[in-house]
Image (cartoon, grey):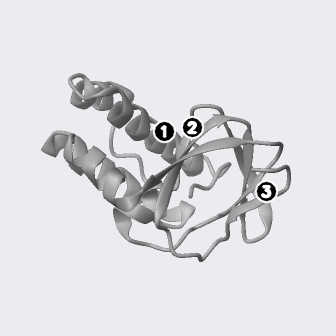
Amino acid sequence: MLDGETLFNQGDKGDHAYMIVHGVMDVLVDGKKVGAMRDGEVFGEMALILDQNRSATIISNKPTELISINKENFDELLSSASEKAKQLIIELCKELSKRSEFQTVKYSRVEIDEILKSENELITKITKQIFYRLERSTDHTFYSI
């Protein structure tokens, strides 16, 4: 993606998740920049998991290389997770999709680590990123996509 290029807009239908190979993507909610994502971060998964429209606009902050993951491939990845990990991911996404003043973090880092101890690296990474976003958003400093 070129500098300043929009990947998707808040309210768009979500049909892909993305991983940043290198670069920076800005996160805008209601037209205001609320955060940025960098190398290695996965985003856009909530729209696929919860079958919701995009909750943020994503714009490249500098030239950025992304890996695009379609819904079918993302669902296949999720099916590789244990039932407990899948439930954790869904619960975290549902909580994160609420307005920030109604969000709660129901799990500790230790509990998350325990649930994820035998999961593959990508499931672990996605889950921990969702948890991190939820922790930050309950501090009212960051909104997720």
Precedes in sequence: disc 2 or disc 3: 3
Q: Is residue 103 visible to the viewer in this orientation of the structure?
A: no
Residue drawn at (57%, 37%), measured in percent from left and top? 41
Residue found at the far left of this picture: 83
2 vs 3, front mark: 2
Q: CA distance from mark 2 to mark 1?
A: 8 Å
Asked if marks 2 and 1 touch (Cβ < 8 Å), the reply is: yes
Of marks 1 and 3, which one's residue comes earlier in the chain?
3
Is residue 75 something that shows in the picture? yes
Give left or right: position of 29 versus 14. Answer: right
- Where disc 3 sits, the SS reads strand
**Front-most of residues 106 and 24:** 24
Q: Which residue is mark 2?
A: 41
Q: Which residue is mark 3?
A: 33
- Few, some or many residues within 10 Å of mark 3 (<14, 14–19, 20+): some
Q: How many marks?
A: 3
Q: Which residue is mark 1?
A: 129
